[in-house]
Amino acid sequence: MTLEEGTNYCGKCNREFKDAKAYKYHIKRSLKHNPIARLRCPLSMECSKIFGSPSALVMHLESGACKSGMDREKLNVLTKELDNSRMITAGEAIDTEQGMANCVP
């Protein structure tokens, strides 16, 4: 986290802010600076990524960027298979063939 002299620039995020107040707010609220967790990718020993929130880990897995080969479709299939209590997949919210297209907002 770097505030360069005379600027409101965050080197860690490569972002500039309009004033010191906005910069301080960013430092206080950003998950990059204040992670709520330190989660390692659990699916591959080759993937050394660490995530600051559960949602960031899920986004990594859904994106297909994980070295494990996981992507959104595979994650949906696993979720549907393993969610025995139907806490996540109640009402067939996850359609493995059409992604989240059939979800009701």
Image: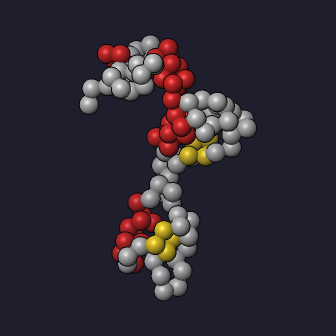
Q: Position of residue 92 (x, y in %)?
A: 35, 16
Q: Is residue 102 above or below residue 53?
A: above
Q: Quarter holding the N terminus?
A: bottom right
Depth order, front residue of 65/10 = 65
Q: Is residue 29 above or below residue 68?
A: below
Q: Is residue 76 above or below residue 48?
A: above
The color scheme shown is secondary structure
Q: Position of residue 33 (x, y in %)?
A: 51, 60
The residue shown at (50%, 18%) is 77
* Observer able to see residue 3: yes
The residue shown at (56%, 30%) is 71
Residue 44 horizontal side relative to residue 37, left or right = right
Q: Is residue 66 above or below residue 85?
A: below
* Observer able to see residue 1: no
Residue 59 horizontal side relative to residue 69, left or right = left
Depth order, front residue of 39/96 = 96
Toward the left, the furthest residue is: 105
Count every numbered label the image shows and give the total. Answer: 0
Toward the bottom, the furthest residue is: 6
Q: Quarter holding the C terminus?
A: top left
The residue shown at (50%, 14%) is 81
The residue shown at (40%, 19%) is 95
Q: Position of residue 20 (x, y in %)?
A: 39, 78
